[in-house]
Amino acid sequence: EVQLLESGGGLVQSGGSLRLSCAASGFTFSSDWMHWVRQAPGKGLVWVARINIDGSRTNYADPVKGRFTISRDNAKNTLYLQVNSLGAEDTAVYYCTRGVTGAFDYWGRGTLVTVSS
Amino acid sequence: EIVLTQSPATLSLSPGERATLSCRASQSVSNFLAWYQQKPGQAPRLLIYDASNRATGIPARFSGSGSGTDFTLTISSLEPEDFAIYYCQQGSNWYTFGQGTKLEIK
């Protein structure tokens, strides 16, 4: 059974940083592109970042470029998202998800990041 | 950025009825269109990918159609567990989601 389990969210002050993690199991993690998608409270879904199978290629949505860094450790089956210079607009549930032909087939339960001013 | 516009914003139907949800793209996305279901407090669940392919474990009452800029998700006969928010998403030019259609019980 495919499982994705995010952690690392919490309450952080504006300008602060967090490192989100996503532990993967039930599939060959090192063979799949991985993504982060976020959802602000009561709002829709927004793609954040993606990483290729060996971590050599990464891409980001414009609002997070230069502030967020996606990475992975295939030996630990874990995906990461380092989030820096956080602002109120970054308050959201962050989902780890597996990419497949332009869609996202498996999702974690998410981790909530709340940025306070 | 490709903008996806979903309609209607809210759809009120009864169990057993047929639901038709629409998604229009601001430019062609070929068939790189997916549909998700999200219930309160839960992660999205992939229903349809590549416009018309059901994801693993998705019941046959869910079907997708369309290509280019106009897409439809059809639920042939609503079950009580189908009432949720539905999002479309394109993967042709990066990734964007529609704003969602809330399917509520009438």
Image (tube, coloured by chain):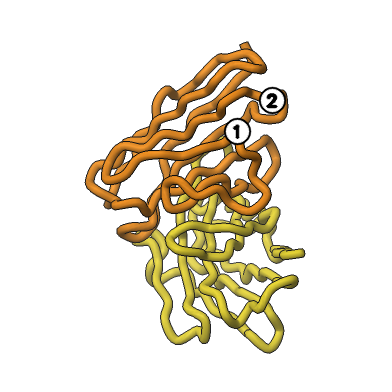
Chain colours: A yellow, B orange
- For residue B79, the mark is 2
Q: Chain of mark 1?
A: B
Q: Name which of mark 1 and mark 2 comes first in the sequence.
A: 1
Q: Kindly identify which residue carries mark 1.
A: B61
Q: Assign a secondary structure to mark 1.
A: loop
Q: Residue at x 45, y 42 (%)?
A: B88
Residue A3: x %, y % from top left: 73, 64
Q: What is the quadrant of residue B92 in the picture?
A: bottom left
Up-down: is A28 above or below A2? below
Q: Is residue A3 left or right of residue A57?
A: right
Q: Quadrant of residue B22?
A: top left
Residue A14 to residue B45: above or below: below
> Is residue A111 something that shows in the picture?
no
Mark 2 is on which residue type?
Answer: Glu
Find residue B1 and report its horizontal and vertical position in percent. Answer: 27, 52
Quadrant assignment, res B106: top right
Q: Do the CB atoms of the residues marked 1 and 2 lie less than 8 Å apart?
A: yes
Q: Residue furthest right?
A: A1
Residue pictured at 43% horizontal, 36% vertical: B99
* Same chain check for tags 1 and 2: yes
Residue A112: image x %, image y %?
66, 53
Residue type at numbered disc 1: Arg
* Residue depicted at 31% across the width and 44% down the height: B67
At 67% from the left edge and 58% from the top edge, which residue is drawn?
A108
